[in-house]
Image (cartoon, grey):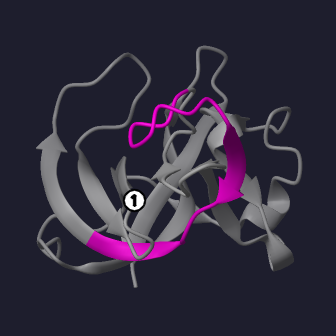
Amino acid sequence: MSQAVDLAVHHDLANAEPRFVAPALVESGAAGAPRLIGGRCAKCGALSFPRAAVCTECMSEEIEKTELAGTGRVYSYSMVHQAPKGWSVPYALGYVDLTDKVRVLAHIDVPESALAIDMPVRLSVGRVGTGPAGEPLMSYTFVQA
């Protein structure tokens, strides 16, 4: 299970120690709060995560960077017991339906006994493993709201 942390410690996620997995997907907002970065089609307004190269609704290639909602509900999840080297197991991996109607695949940092479909969650940052040099691997996660 990951360990939630305050993003204020990680102002520059791309170069931060500990190492952040997929730093382009999350940024530090006001007061260090994490925010997911996705895409919004300039033509039809459709949202995507991660940011798509082509809009799946209208096929436009005009996709702008946009901040996505930081809250949602668990759509589905599975407990992972085998993972790539360095990843902490077991962990919950699931889909979260954000309040702005985007579905996101993410670690869900909730004890298995408390995890439930339709559970309200909020965006966080947590430790998901250890890198080859022993550095903590961090990622966006969702925690119980």
* Quadrant housing residue 69: bottom right
Q: Which residues are magenta?
A: 54-73
Instruction: Answer above or below: position of 121 versus 40.
Output: below
Query: How far from the left and from the top, in percent, is residue 44?
Result: 53, 54
Which residue is pictured at 70% across the width and 37% down the height? 24
Which residue is pictured at 52% across the width and 29% down the height? 54
The answer to which of 114 and 133 lies nearer the viewer is: 114
Instruction: Answer above or below: position of 60 versus 42.
Output: above
Quadrant where the image shows the C terminus:
bottom left
Can residue 32 be spotted in the picture? yes
Let me know if residue 66 is in the magenta part.
Answer: yes
Query: How far from the left and from the top, in percent, is residue 34?
Result: 67, 64
Left/right placement of residue 19 relative to residue 39 reads right
The amino acid type, in three-letter code, at marker 1 is: Val
Residue that label 1 marks: 102
Can residue 20 be spotted in the picture? no
* Quadrant housing residue 21: top right
Instruction: Answer above or below: position of 101 versus 58.
Output: below
Which residue is pictured at 66% across the width and 63% down the height? 35
